[in-house]
């Protein structure tokens, strides 16, 4: 649009001054070249190839040539009293093109080149910015358009990166669901049935169990790699705890927390699971449930073991065994959260670990 308006202004200027030129026919030739080049630039820009460095450099060269051609068609006195024939406004198209492609530095340098042509024609440099502020305008145009172009490119690159990341995450989640619903369940079934049958199939069950755990770790590692480092998906971290006798249930959507909070909460869950393995009894199973409550997050760790007799925890503290107090309750206190224990003889153990979204 600016190219069209500047072209109309240049034509109007041409009609106004062409009769005063020393060689009017040459003046019309200059304006014919101006119109032809403006049309070519418009088509090139709209088609895309006009935004390449070679084309922009050619445009700068054409502007320089047309401005300097003023000396061939006008007298020295006319040049001293008027602007160059294609007009400074039309020549600013080269400044804008350079700023869009090369940024603010390229735009400002092109503006200096455009304005220096007037000094070459007149034979002197005007330092009176009050009467001739065109150089300031050229520099401002090159700077403003160049910065706007750089900002637009960065925004476009970030948008493309976000789109690629979103597509990658969606594909990873789709594959994770497919693996969980298919391969992992089959491996878990083979492991369970192999142990039930016994004999030689027990070795097959162990291999299936190993492959299931390895595949779970691989899937979760891919999910965690999608994070940005400062934040972490607690659900993905807890899924790594899944095993033959540990069932993990998490929401379908990511439960994102500060990485330090997620690490500590996951460590507390690990301590609770270690206690299940050490104290719940042979064959006891554990169940981990993650709930996203909006302002807070709760992880429940429950087992179907023998439970904790009344007064056993207090007795352990008196004996100096403060693992539960430090590893689970202490972590929750440090996170500004809460650890609640439900247990009893023969009732198993359930920990409810709750942390706020922000401390």
Image (tube, helix red, strand yellow):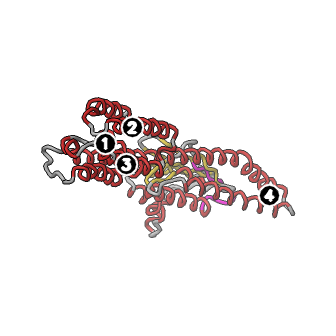
Residue 199 in the image: state x and y as whole percent.
86, 62
| Residue assigned mark 2 | 29
| Residue assigned mark 4 | 195
Find numbered disc 2 in the image and state the secondary structure of the residue it sits on: helix
Q: Earlier in the sequence, mark 3 or mark 1?
A: 3
Q: Earlier in the sequence, mark 2 or mark 3?
A: 2
Residue 289 in the image: state x and y as whole percent.
56, 47
Find numbered disc 4 in the image and state the secondary structure of the residue it sits on: helix
Estimate how packed mark 4 is, as few (under 14), some (14 to 19) or many (20 or more) residues with alpha carbons within 10 Å: some
Is residue 281 covered in magenta? yes
Seen from this angle, which residue lies furthest bottom? 320
Estimate how packed mark 2 is, as few (under 14), some (14 to 19) or many (20 or more) residues with alpha carbons within 10 Å: few
Residue 308 in the image: state x and y as whole percent.
55, 56
Occupied quadrant, residue 278:
bottom right
Find numbered disc 3 in the image and state the secondary structure of the residue it sits on: helix
* Magenta stretch bounds: 279-288
* 273 sits left or right of 24 in the view: right
Q: Which residue is drawn at 40% across and 47% down?
A: 62
Label 2 and label 3: CA atoms lie apart by 13 Å
Q: Which of marks 2 and 1 is nearer the N terminus?
A: 2
Label 4 and label 1: CA atoms lie apart by 100 Å
Residue 315 vs 90, above or below: the answer is below
Instruction: Tally the numbered discs.
Output: 4
Q: Earlier in the sequence, mark 4 or mark 1?
A: 1
Label 3 and label 1: CA atoms lie apart by 13 Å
Q: Earlier in the sequence, mark 3 or mark 4?
A: 3
Q: Is residue 305 visible?
A: no
Is residue 154 covered in magenta? no
Estimate how packed mark 3 is, as few (under 14), some (14 to 19) or many (20 or more) residues with alpha carbons within 10 Å: few
């Amino acid at each position: 649009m600016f190219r069209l308006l500047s072209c109309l202004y240049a034509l109007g200027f041409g009609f106004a001054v062409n009769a005063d030129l020393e060689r009017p026919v040459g003046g019309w030739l200059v304006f014919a070249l101006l119109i032809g080049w403006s049309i070519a630039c418009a088509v090139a820009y709209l088609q895309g190839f006009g935004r390449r460095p070679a084309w922009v450099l050619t445009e700068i060269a054409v502007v320089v040539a047309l401005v300097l051609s003023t000396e061939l068609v006008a007298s020295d006195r006319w040049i001293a009293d008027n602007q160059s024939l294609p007009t400074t406004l039309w020549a600013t198209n080269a400044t804008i093109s350079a700023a869009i492609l090369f940024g603010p530095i390229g735009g400002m340098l092109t503006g200096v080149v455009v304005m220096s042509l007037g000094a070459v024609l007149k034979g002197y440099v005007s330092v009176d910015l009050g009467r001739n502020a065109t150089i300031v305008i050229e520099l401002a145009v090159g700077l403003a358009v160049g910065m706007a172009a750089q900002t637009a490119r960065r925004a476009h690159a970030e948008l493309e990166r976000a789109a690629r990341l979103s597509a990658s995450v969606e594909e990873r989640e789709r594959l994770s669901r497919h693996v969980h619903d298919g391969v992992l369940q089959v491996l878990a079934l083979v492991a369970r049935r192999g142990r039930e049958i016994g004999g030689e199939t027990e070795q097959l069950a162990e291999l299936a169990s190993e492959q299931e755990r390895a595949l779970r770790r691989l899937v979760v590692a891919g999910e965690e790699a999608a994070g940005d480092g400062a934040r972490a998906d607690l659900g993905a971290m807890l899924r790594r705890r899944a095993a033959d006798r540990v069932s993990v249930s998490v929401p379908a959507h990511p439960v994102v927390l500060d990485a330090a909070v997620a690490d500590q909460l996951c460590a507390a869950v690990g301590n609770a699971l270690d206690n299940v393995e050490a104290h719940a009894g042979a064959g006891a199973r554990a169940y981990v449930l993650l709930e996203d409550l909006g302002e807070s997050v709760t992880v429940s760790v429950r087992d179907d073991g023998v439970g904790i007799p009344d007064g056993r925890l207090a007795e352990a503290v008196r004996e100096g065994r403060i693992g539960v107090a430090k590893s689970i309750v202490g972590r929750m206190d440090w996170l500004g959260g809460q650890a609640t224990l439900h247990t009893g003889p023969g009732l198993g153990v359930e920990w409810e670990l709750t942390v706020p979204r922000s401390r």
